[in-house]
Image (spheres, grey):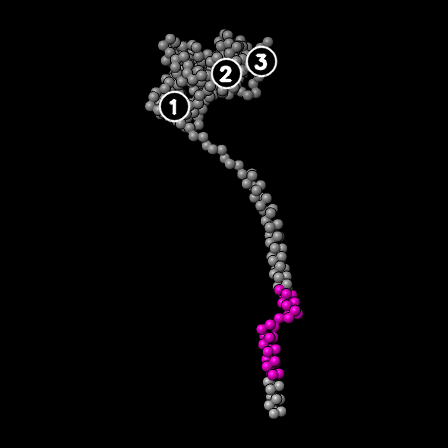
Amino acid sequence: MKTFLFKKILFGIGVVFVLLILIGIIFPTSDSEISKREIKNVEVDTRVAISNLKEQEAVVPKVQNLSPKVEATKETVAQVKIPPAVPTYTYYSVTSVVDGDTLKVNINGNTETLRLIGMDTPETVDPRKPVQCFGKEASNKAKELLTGKKVRIEKDPTQGERDKYNRLLAYIYREDGLFYNKYMIEIGYAHEYTYGTPYKYQAEFKVAQRSAQASFAGLWSPNTCNGDTTSSAGTTTITPVTQTTQTAGKFYTSSYSTSKYYYPAECDGWKSLSVTYLKSFDSLDALLLAYPSKAKSPQCD
């Protein structure tokens, strides 16, 4: 009996022990264990935060190093100049050259006569006038420069659309960029010409004429028209100037750059000038028009 009771007590103790063990397994967490787990979680979060901070610190110098490059790139971009757009022009075929300052072009199937602004060449086709001095030369030069070519047209509002003969008023440029109006004056095949109102390129054309005069180019040569194209072609006598030539009323000078003086024909000083640079004029006015800075030689007084 005692033995059975003893066994029962032991069994009860065992059951309680087992229950305690089961309770520990099912509910193992204590306050201390919760605290430990929270500490571990905080440690993990801290390590993650530190790791992220280190990564951010590593990125900052890279960004700082990149900043000057970005600024330099911005400055370079600011300095880059975008080239201006190349203008597009319409060019028209020259159908015929009338004379040095007049031509015909094909504009969209219609033939238009152009009278060129700012220039005037000696007459060759005006039925009211004889062919003027250097007219044929100017006309031939125009044909040489324009026949078979294409030109673009520039109008000038200061001169109006057309002249009294219904000719279109214009400047013309060849496809290679040659500014024909100015070029003809520059090489001495045309006078600068202002019709009433100053035109766009007047100052440029006047400079071009002075250059032609100074170099005795084309119609400014004493051996052609000496600047006066009103005389008829063929009436100008071209007489080579030599040191033995002496004509009453003539005036002489040298075209050499350092020459300062002119000489009347009766003054023998001109005979010592180099034939290469010797220039003769029919009047003192003509000489001074070409060489306004020349003074009479002291040896001629």
For badge 3, the amino acid type reads Ala
**Dividing the picture into quarters, in which one does residue 260 lie?**
top right
State which region is magenta: 12-41
Mark linked to residue 146: 1
Instruction: Kindly state the secondary structure of the residue where label 3 is placed.
Output: strand
- Nearer-N-terminus badge (1/2): 1
Task: Judge whether 158 appears above or below 58 on screen.
Answer: above
| For residue 23, side relative to residue 244 (left or right) | right
Can you tell which of label 1 and label 3 is closer to the viewer?
Answer: 1
- Nearer-N-terminus badge (1/3): 1
The residue identified by callout 3 is: 295
Per the model, the C-alpha gap separating discs 1 and 3 is 42 Å
In this orientation, does residue 277 appear? no
Q: Position of residue 267 (x, y in %)?
A: 55, 10
State the residue lying farthest toward the front: 1
Residues marked 1 and 3 touching at CB (< 8 Å): no
Circle 1 crowding by C-alpha within 10 Å: few under 14, some 14–19, many from 20: many
In this orientation, does residue 168 appear? yes
For badge 2, the amino acid type reads Pro
The residue identified by callout 2 is: 198
Circle 2 crowding by C-alpha within 10 Å: few under 14, some 14–19, many from 20: few
Instruction: Kindly state the secondary structure of the residue where label 1 is placed.
Output: helix
